[in-house]
Protein backbone atom coordinates (compact mmCIF):
# COMPACT_ATOMS: atom_id res chain seq x y z
CA UNK A 1 0.00 0.00 0.00
CA UNK A 2 1.23 3.49 -0.85
CA UNK A 3 1.42 6.34 1.65
CA UNK A 4 -1.72 8.43 1.87
CA UNK A 5 0.36 11.57 1.26
CA UNK A 6 3.20 11.64 -1.26
CA UNK A 7 6.14 14.01 -0.83
CA UNK A 8 4.33 16.86 -2.57
CA UNK A 9 1.25 16.51 -0.38
CA UNK A 10 3.46 16.74 2.71
CA UNK A 11 5.24 19.82 1.39
CA UNK A 12 1.96 21.51 0.52
CA UNK A 13 0.56 20.83 3.98
CA UNK A 14 3.70 22.20 5.59
CA UNK A 15 3.55 25.29 3.39
CA UNK A 16 -0.13 25.89 4.15
CA UNK A 17 0.52 25.47 7.87
CA UNK A 18 3.21 28.16 7.71
CA UNK A 19 1.29 30.42 5.33
CA UNK A 20 4.17 30.54 2.85
CA UNK A 21 3.56 31.39 -0.80
CA UNK A 22 4.44 28.81 -3.42
CA UNK A 23 7.00 31.12 -5.03
CA UNK A 24 8.78 31.62 -1.72
CA UNK A 25 8.91 27.88 -1.07
CA UNK A 26 10.29 27.30 -4.55
CA UNK A 27 13.07 29.81 -3.94
CA UNK A 28 14.05 28.15 -0.66
CA UNK A 29 13.95 24.74 -2.35
CA UNK A 30 16.31 25.95 -5.07
CA UNK A 31 13.81 25.13 -7.80
CA UNK A 32 12.07 27.15 -10.48
CA UNK A 33 8.49 27.87 -9.49
CA UNK A 34 6.95 25.58 -12.18
CA UNK A 35 9.22 22.72 -11.07
CA UNK A 36 8.30 23.22 -7.43
CA UNK A 37 4.59 23.41 -8.30
CA UNK A 38 4.91 20.10 -10.16
CA UNK A 39 6.67 18.60 -7.14
CA UNK A 40 3.76 19.51 -4.87
CA UNK A 41 1.25 18.19 -7.37
CA UNK A 42 2.92 14.87 -8.17
CA UNK A 43 5.50 14.17 -5.47
CA UNK A 44 8.06 13.67 -8.25
CA UNK A 45 11.09 15.76 -9.21
CA UNK A 46 13.84 15.76 -11.85
CA UNK A 47 16.22 17.78 -9.68
CA UNK A 48 16.00 17.26 -5.89
CA UNK A 49 14.99 20.23 -3.74
CA UNK A 50 17.19 21.52 -0.93
CA UNK A 51 15.55 19.31 1.67
CA UNK A 52 17.17 20.81 4.77
CA UNK A 53 16.46 24.43 3.84
CA UNK A 54 12.95 23.62 2.65
CA UNK A 55 12.16 21.63 5.77
CA UNK A 56 13.38 24.45 8.00
CA UNK A 57 11.18 26.96 6.15
CA UNK A 58 8.09 24.74 6.26
CA UNK A 59 8.45 23.49 9.83
CA UNK A 60 9.27 19.96 8.64
CA UNK A 61 12.22 17.67 9.29
CA UNK A 62 14.47 17.82 6.23
CA UNK A 63 16.10 14.43 6.77
CA UNK A 64 12.70 12.77 7.09
CA UNK A 65 11.50 14.55 3.94
CA UNK A 66 14.45 13.10 2.07
CA UNK A 67 13.63 9.65 3.44
CA UNK A 68 10.06 9.99 2.15
CA UNK A 69 11.46 11.09 -1.24
CA UNK A 70 13.59 7.93 -1.36
CA UNK A 71 10.52 5.75 -0.92
CA UNK A 72 10.20 5.17 2.81
CA UNK A 73 7.26 2.99 3.83
CA UNK A 74 6.40 1.63 7.27
CA UNK A 75 7.51 -1.97 7.75
CA UNK A 76 4.83 -4.61 7.06
CA UNK A 77 3.04 -5.70 10.23
CA UNK A 78 2.22 -9.22 11.29
CA UNK A 79 -1.46 -8.61 11.92
CA UNK A 80 -1.91 -12.14 13.24
CA UNK A 81 -0.73 -10.67 16.56
CA UNK A 82 -4.15 -8.99 16.72
CA UNK A 83 -6.42 -11.86 15.71
CA UNK A 84 -9.53 -9.91 16.70
CA UNK A 85 -8.82 -6.84 14.53
CA UNK A 86 -9.88 -6.27 10.92
CA UNK A 87 -9.50 -3.33 8.56
CA UNK A 88 -12.39 -2.75 6.15
CA UNK A 89 -11.76 -0.42 3.20
CA UNK A 90 -14.29 1.33 0.98
CA UNK A 91 -13.97 3.86 -1.83
CA UNK A 92 -16.34 6.55 -3.16
CA UNK A 93 -15.92 9.92 -4.85
CA UNK A 94 -12.28 9.06 -5.54
CA UNK A 95 -11.51 8.75 -1.81
CA UNK A 96 -10.52 5.52 -0.07
CA UNK A 97 -11.09 5.23 3.67
CA UNK A 98 -10.60 2.56 6.34
CA UNK A 99 -12.80 1.56 9.24
CA UNK A 100 -11.93 -1.10 11.81
CA UNK A 101 -13.65 -3.91 13.69
CA UNK A 102 -12.40 -5.35 16.98
CA UNK A 103 -14.08 -8.07 19.01
CA UNK A 104 -13.74 -10.39 21.97
CA UNK A 105 -12.94 -13.90 20.76
CA UNK A 106 -15.02 -15.56 23.52
CA UNK A 107 -18.21 -13.47 23.74
CA UNK A 108 -18.01 -12.36 20.05
CA UNK A 109 -19.07 -8.86 21.10
CA UNK A 110 -17.66 -6.32 18.65
CA UNK A 111 -16.94 -2.62 18.26
CA UNK A 112 -16.73 -0.69 15.01
CA UNK A 113 -14.45 2.34 14.59
CA UNK A 114 -15.93 4.67 11.94
CA UNK A 115 -18.06 3.28 9.11
CA UNK A 116 -16.45 4.28 5.82
CA UNK A 117 -18.64 4.80 2.78
CA UNK A 118 -20.50 1.49 2.63
CA UNK A 119 -21.85 -0.76 5.37
CA UNK A 120 -22.16 -3.89 3.17
CA UNK A 121 -18.64 -5.28 3.78
CA UNK A 122 -19.01 -4.57 7.51
CA UNK A 123 -22.26 -6.53 7.66
CA UNK A 124 -20.74 -9.35 5.60
CA UNK A 125 -17.81 -9.76 7.99
CA UNK A 126 -20.07 -9.60 11.05
CA UNK A 127 -22.38 -12.27 9.61
CA UNK A 128 -19.55 -14.52 8.43
CA UNK A 129 -17.86 -14.47 11.84
CA UNK A 130 -20.89 -14.57 14.14
CA UNK A 131 -20.19 -11.22 15.79
CA UNK A 132 -22.58 -9.13 17.88
CA UNK A 133 -21.96 -5.45 17.13
CA UNK A 134 -22.40 -3.49 20.38
CA UNK A 135 -20.46 -0.23 19.94
CA UNK A 136 -19.74 2.36 17.24
CA UNK A 137 -16.79 4.68 17.95
CA UNK A 138 -16.40 7.74 15.71
CA UNK A 139 -12.96 9.30 15.33
CA UNK A 140 -14.58 12.41 13.81
CA UNK A 141 -17.66 13.21 11.77
CA UNK A 142 -16.24 14.02 8.32
CA UNK A 143 -18.41 12.43 5.64
CA UNK A 144 -16.03 9.70 4.49
CA UNK A 145 -15.79 8.35 8.04
CA UNK A 146 -19.51 8.35 8.87
CA UNK A 147 -21.29 7.93 5.52
CA UNK A 148 -22.61 4.46 6.42
CA UNK A 149 -23.60 5.34 9.99
CA UNK A 150 -27.31 5.48 9.14
CA UNK A 151 -27.24 1.97 7.71
CA UNK A 152 -25.28 0.63 10.70
CA UNK A 153 -27.67 2.16 13.24
CA UNK A 154 -30.69 0.97 11.26
CA UNK A 155 -29.50 -2.63 11.37
CA UNK A 156 -28.26 -2.39 14.97
CA UNK A 157 -30.70 0.04 16.63
CA UNK A 158 -29.36 -0.71 20.13
CA UNK A 159 -25.73 -0.02 19.23
CA UNK A 160 -24.02 2.38 21.63
CA UNK A 161 -22.54 5.42 19.85
CA UNK A 162 -19.32 7.04 21.12
CA UNK A 163 -18.33 10.44 19.71
CA UNK A 164 -16.77 13.75 20.68
CA UNK A 165 -19.18 15.75 18.50
CA UNK A 166 -20.66 18.60 20.52
CA UNK A 167 -24.02 18.11 18.78
CA UNK A 168 -24.36 14.53 20.07
CA UNK A 169 -26.66 13.75 23.00
CA UNK A 170 -24.76 13.75 26.31
CA UNK A 171 -25.05 9.98 26.76
CA UNK A 172 -23.11 9.43 23.53
CA UNK A 173 -20.30 11.94 24.10
CA UNK A 174 -16.84 10.77 25.07
CA UNK A 175 -15.60 11.85 28.48
CA UNK A 176 -12.08 11.86 29.86
CA UNK A 177 -11.21 8.57 31.56
CA UNK A 178 -14.15 6.74 29.95
CA UNK A 179 -13.46 3.10 29.21
CA UNK A 180 -15.38 0.25 27.61
CA UNK A 181 -14.74 -3.48 27.94
CA UNK A 182 -15.19 -6.07 25.21
CA UNK A 183 -14.37 -9.17 27.19
CA UNK A 184 -10.71 -8.72 28.09
CA UNK A 185 -10.19 -5.83 25.67
CA UNK A 186 -10.18 -2.34 27.21
CA UNK A 187 -11.12 0.65 25.02
CA UNK A 188 -10.28 4.23 26.03
CA UNK A 189 -10.25 7.62 24.29
CA UNK A 190 -7.88 10.56 23.92
CA UNK A 191 -8.92 13.89 22.39
CA UNK A 192 -6.95 14.69 19.21
CA UNK A 193 -8.56 17.77 17.60
CA UNK A 194 -6.87 19.90 14.97
CA UNK A 195 -7.90 18.12 11.79
CA UNK A 196 -11.47 18.14 13.13
CA UNK A 197 -12.89 19.83 16.20
CA UNK A 198 -14.37 16.52 17.34
CA UNK A 199 -11.24 14.48 16.59
CA UNK A 200 -10.55 11.64 19.01
CA UNK A 201 -8.15 8.69 19.06
CA UNK A 202 -9.28 5.40 20.56
CA UNK A 203 -6.84 3.06 22.29
CA UNK A 204 -7.49 -0.68 22.47
CA UNK A 205 -5.44 -2.58 25.05
CA UNK A 206 -5.33 -5.86 26.97
CA UNK A 207 -5.00 -7.95 23.81
CA UNK A 208 -4.54 -11.72 24.09
CA UNK A 209 -0.93 -12.92 24.18
CA UNK A 210 0.21 -9.43 25.22
CA UNK A 211 -0.03 -7.98 21.71
CA UNK A 212 0.83 -4.25 21.68
CA UNK A 213 -1.81 -1.57 22.07
CA UNK A 214 -3.78 -0.44 19.03
CA UNK A 215 -4.52 3.24 18.33
CA UNK A 216 -7.29 4.31 15.93
CA UNK A 217 -6.68 8.03 15.24
CA UNK A 218 -8.92 8.69 12.24
CA UNK A 219 -7.07 11.42 10.33
CA UNK A 220 -4.99 12.76 13.22
CA UNK A 221 -1.96 10.79 11.98
CA UNK A 222 -1.12 9.01 8.73
CA UNK A 223 2.02 7.01 7.98
CA UNK A 224 4.51 9.80 7.24
CA UNK A 225 2.02 12.66 7.50
CA UNK A 226 -1.03 14.13 9.27
CA UNK A 227 -4.52 15.14 8.25
CA UNK A 228 -5.05 18.70 7.06
CA UNK A 229 -5.23 21.19 9.94
CA UNK A 230 -8.77 22.31 9.21
CA UNK A 231 -9.22 23.53 12.76
CA UNK A 232 -5.58 24.27 13.65
CA UNK A 233 -2.27 22.93 12.32
CA UNK A 234 -0.50 23.70 15.59
CA UNK A 235 -3.18 22.00 17.67
CA UNK A 236 -3.16 18.95 15.39
CA UNK A 237 0.58 18.47 15.88
CA UNK A 238 0.49 19.20 19.60
CA UNK A 239 -2.27 16.68 20.26
CA UNK A 240 -0.61 14.00 18.15
CA UNK A 241 2.59 14.44 20.19
CA UNK A 242 0.79 14.43 23.53
CA UNK A 243 -1.91 11.86 22.99
CA UNK A 244 -0.59 9.44 20.34
CA UNK A 245 3.20 9.60 20.36
CA UNK A 246 3.28 9.28 24.15
CA UNK A 247 2.06 5.69 23.72
CA UNK A 248 4.58 2.80 23.66
CA UNK A 249 6.75 2.68 20.53
CA UNK A 250 5.28 -0.65 19.39
CA UNK A 251 1.69 0.65 19.46
CA UNK A 252 -0.02 -0.22 16.17
CA UNK A 253 -1.53 2.87 14.52
CA UNK A 254 -4.60 2.14 12.38
CA UNK A 255 -5.19 5.38 10.41
CA UNK A 256 -8.25 6.37 8.45
CA UNK A 257 -6.21 6.42 5.23
CA UNK A 258 -3.01 4.75 4.09
CA UNK A 259 -1.00 1.88 5.62
CA UNK A 260 -0.64 0.66 9.17
CA UNK A 261 2.28 2.13 11.09
CA UNK A 262 3.57 2.35 14.67
CA UNK A 263 4.36 5.10 17.14
CA UNK A 264 8.06 4.29 16.87
CA UNK A 265 8.10 4.45 13.07
CA UNK A 266 6.30 7.78 13.03
CA UNK A 267 8.63 9.35 15.58
CA UNK A 268 11.56 8.24 13.42
CA UNK A 269 10.13 9.05 9.98
CA UNK A 270 7.20 11.50 10.03
CA UNK A 271 8.45 14.93 8.82
CA UNK A 272 5.86 16.78 10.92
CA UNK A 273 7.51 15.59 14.17
Image (cartoon, rainbow, N blue to C red):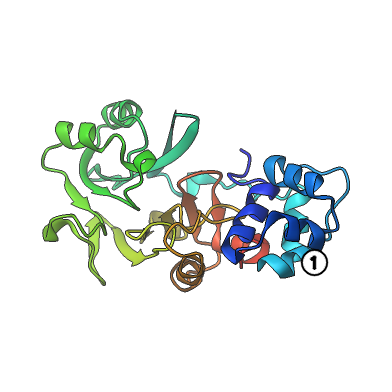
**In the displayed image of the protein, which residue is found farthest to the right?**
47
Q: Is residue 264 visible?
A: no
What residue do we see at 63% from left, 40% from top?
2
Question: Relative to residue 126, is residue 134 drawn left or right?
Answer: left
What residue do we see at 70% from left, 54% from top?
22
Image coordinates of residue 217 in percent, x first then y, are 42, 56
Label 1: how many Cα within 10 Å (few below 14, some 14–19, many 20+): some
What residue do we see at 48% from left, 34% from top?
95
Question: Relative to residue 131, is residue 70 drawn left or right?
Answer: right
* Quadrant (top left, top right, bottom left, bottom right) of the N terminus: top right
Q: Is residue 35 visible?
A: yes
Residue for badge 1? 52
What residue do we see at 68% from left, 41% from top?
41
Task: Look at the picture and state if 151 lies above or below 12.
Answer: above
Question: Relative to residue 220, is residue 200 drawn left or right?
Answer: left
* Quadrant (top left, top right, bottom left, bottom right) of the C terminus: bottom right
Image quarter of residue 56? bottom right
Please name whichever residue, 100 or 106, is drawn nearer the observer in this view of the structure. Answer: 100
Question: Relative to residue 256, is residue 32 drawn left or right?
Answer: right
Image coordinates of residue 98 in percent, x first then y, are 44, 40
Task: Look at the picture and state if 220 lies above or below 134.
Answer: below
Task: Look at the picture and state if 139 lies above or below 105.
Answer: below
Task: Look at the picture and state if 227 lies above or below 38.
Answer: below
Image coordinates of residue 233 in percent, x first then y, are 50, 64
Amino acid sequence: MQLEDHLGDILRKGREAKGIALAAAAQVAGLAEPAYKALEETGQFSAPPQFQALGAALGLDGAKLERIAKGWLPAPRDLSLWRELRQITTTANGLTVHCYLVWDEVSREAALFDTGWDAAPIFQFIDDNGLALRHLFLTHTHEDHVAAMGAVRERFPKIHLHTSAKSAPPQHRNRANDFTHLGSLRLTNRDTPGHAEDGVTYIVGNWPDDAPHVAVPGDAVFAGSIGRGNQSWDLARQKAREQIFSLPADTLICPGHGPFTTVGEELANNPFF
